[in-house]
Image (cartoon, coloured by chain):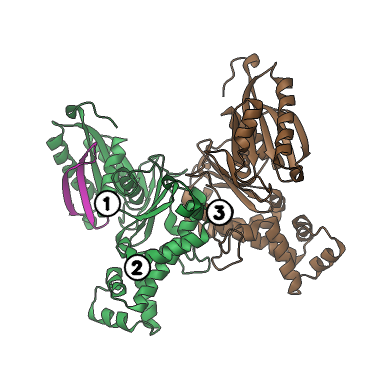
Chain colours: A brown, B green
């Protein structure tokens, strides 16, 4: 976007409404974060209270920056399934009691400003597209490896919502059709092999089968037995921890091969907490992807393609800011 | 498209260049087929000869209709992988010797008219979108179950090509990651379970294991042991033939669940020769899709969605004309 003069520059407010943290930022049209307000999401105090907190923070930022910039609007990233038409949450395990609550209209009513609601994984993909790993490509698919596996698809710069706003549920691609039961009803979903929850489950399985003495010791010593800790053991060379991340990589490679064969995008970005274990899972991921996707292989450098036509699979760059930045971006489009 | 007066109406020429048949049609902007020329693709006489045949037929149709209509251009559907930028074929098992031959530019040069080249499965998807099963939706994914399994994705009325024109290779979605080896290098591709070739292979396997006495008899009596014949046996109640089409349906259901979860389109169309066995494979397909895709389930009528927001999986309507009609459409867009 070309801005004629600084005085006319726009700013937007992005909200990242997580089940634990609530973050609200003022962001200018160039992507500069002007100010950030961080607080806890006090889910227990009910949705009206949380919406009140959101509106208070937005008002503070509006007041502070509306003299200098033109206010463009508000974007909110929310975990769960959104009905784009009504601006309500269909399902949101992390925000109990918010189902069918008209979040968008309620905030619009209280503030008298335009609000765009978006799924958090879609917002993260848009953030990475705008200012992160995918800033130089037109289209991107992002996988967010967290408690679950979220997905976001941006085509020609815009989030692909599909018919009912439920597109990009890439965490529920079937990897092993007779595999681990998923909460979604399917078996063998990517989420069951590449989320933090999956890493922990695979570690517990390995311990239970007596195959992971080091991890067993770590678990007994540390009540916070997390995927991060398992990654630390993998980094230190523990074979059973390494095997777990190879499984993560293989599942990601199978899922990415499907995505590359179907979408043929220039870039796939891997984000979320588990992506910090990139060194541990990416070799198996790339190997599997290369073996399984002829579309991917056709874009590899030895196929004499120009470098700009290479399929890239890369780590996210914006960390936990991706969703917040993407949410602000929604109001600037 | 609104046409002001009949005298200004456009017509285009669509070419369906198959490995066996060559079909060239003049089609008006409303989709009416004005005239069709059908001949054999004499692949053995070389590409120059075949291109000559195509150009001769196009000239005949151009002469005949250019008095009455305004000529819009030529669209050609070709089996194989196309480089959209150069208008050449990367790979085309059915047209040996055509690799890296500049088909598009050669025909443009000979005729002095604009030519659009397209993969045949993409052209078929566009044909079904224009005049077939998907004419009332904006976006559609089509699976063509033939010798292989082709795919075409149309988003907001346009073919989704992806970065290198290789998008929608839905036949190579991994269904069973340790399954049957595919020519593409992957294992367990949809194509290995839902193509005519796969139906025949599964029948031969059942016969070899002594599990299909009726099919064994049919094979010994009929040298043309085809997927069509196997479907006939399924229709007549043969359990082993029915089991084969249930396998086809299950594989399609797994693949469709991935596509619905990722793309969330309003419609998925199943075409190609094997789709005539719809009655035999669709129950297992729908069952598997319902079980595996929560995105699909969320759009089912009992979820109180409006009917226009239902995910439809349906048979193609245009039969073998889909590619030809889609090819003509390319020149009218």
Does B307 sit above or below residue A137? below
Identify the mark at residue A157; answer none if there is no mark.
Answer: none
Does A117 sit above or below residue B16? above
* CA–CA distance in space, label 3 to label 2: 31 Å
Q: Residue A315 appears at what percent x and percent y?
A: 65, 46
Identify the mark at residue A256; answer none if there is no mark.
Answer: 3
Q: Which residues are magenta?
A: B18-40
Say whether residue B18 is left or right of residue B204.
left
Dot 2 corresponds to which residue?
B280
> Any magenta on residue B20?
yes
* CA–CA distance in space, label 1 to label 3: 33 Å
Dot 1 corresponds to which residue?
B318
Q: Residue A259 appears at what percent x and percent y?
A: 52, 52
Image point 69% across, 16% down: which residue?
A68
Image point 34% across, 43% down: which residue?
B136
* CA–CA distance in space, label 2 to label 1: 20 Å
Quadrant position of residue B21: bottom left
Q: Chain of mark 1?
A: B
Q: Nearest the camera: A43 or B263? A: A43
| Quadrant (top left/top right/bottom left/bottom right) for the C terminus of chain B | top left
Quadrant position of residue A57: top right
Does A172 sit above or below residue A80? below
Q: Nearest the camera: A32 or B39? A: A32
For residue A297, say whether it is visible: no
The verdict on a common chain for dots 1 and 3 is no
Q: Nearest the camera: A121 or B163? A: A121
Neighbor class of circle 2 (other Cα within 10 Å; few <14, some 14-19, many 20+) is many
The verdict on a common chain for dots 3 and 2 is no
Q: Residue A49 appears at what percent x and percent y?
A: 74, 37
Q: Residue A327 appears at what percent x and percent y?
A: 63, 35
* Nearest to viewer (mark 2 / mark 1): 2
């Amino acid at each position: 976007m070309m801005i004629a003069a600084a005085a006319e520059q726009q700013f937007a407010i992005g909200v990242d409404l997580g089940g634990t943290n609530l973050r609200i930022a003022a962001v200018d049209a160039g992507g500069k974060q002007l100010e950030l307000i961080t607080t806890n999401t006090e889910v227990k105090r009910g949705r009206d209270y949380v919406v009140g907190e959101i509106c208070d923070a937005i008002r503070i930022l509006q007041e502070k920056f509306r003299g200098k910039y033109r206010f463009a609007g508000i974007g909110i990233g929310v975990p769960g399934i959104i009905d784009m038409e009504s601006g309500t949450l269909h399902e949101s395990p992390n925000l109990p009691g918010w189902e069918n609550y008209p979040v968008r209209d309620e905030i619009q009513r209280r503030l008298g400003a335009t609000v765009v609601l978006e799924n958090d994984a879609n917002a993260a993909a848009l953030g990475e597209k705008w200012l992160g790993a995918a800033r130089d490509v037109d289209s991107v698919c992002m996988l967010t490896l967290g408690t679950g596996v979220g997905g976001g698809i941006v085509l020609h710069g815009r989030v692909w919502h599909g018919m009912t706003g439920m597109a990009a549920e890439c965490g529920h691609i079937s990897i092993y059709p007779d595999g681990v039961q998923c909460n979604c009803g399917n078996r063998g979903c990517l989420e069951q092999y590449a989320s933090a929850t999956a890493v922990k489950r695979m570690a517990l399985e390995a311990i239970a089968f007596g195959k992971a003495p080091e991890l067993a010791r770590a678990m007994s010593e540390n009540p916070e037995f997390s995927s991060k800790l398992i990654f630390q053991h993998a980094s230190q060379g523990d074979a059973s921890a390494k095997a777990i991340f190879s499984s993560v990589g293989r599942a990601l490679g199978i899922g990415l091969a499907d995505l590359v064969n179907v979408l043929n995008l220039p870039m796939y970005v891997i984000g979320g907490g588990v992506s910090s274990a990139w060194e541990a899972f990416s070799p198996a991921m790339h190997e599997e992807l290369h073996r399984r996707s002829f579309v991917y292989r056709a874009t590899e450098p030895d196929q004499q393609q120009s470098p700009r036509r290479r399929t890239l699979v890369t780590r996210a760059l914006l960390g936990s800011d991706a969703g917040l930045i993407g949410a602000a971006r929604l109001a600037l489009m």
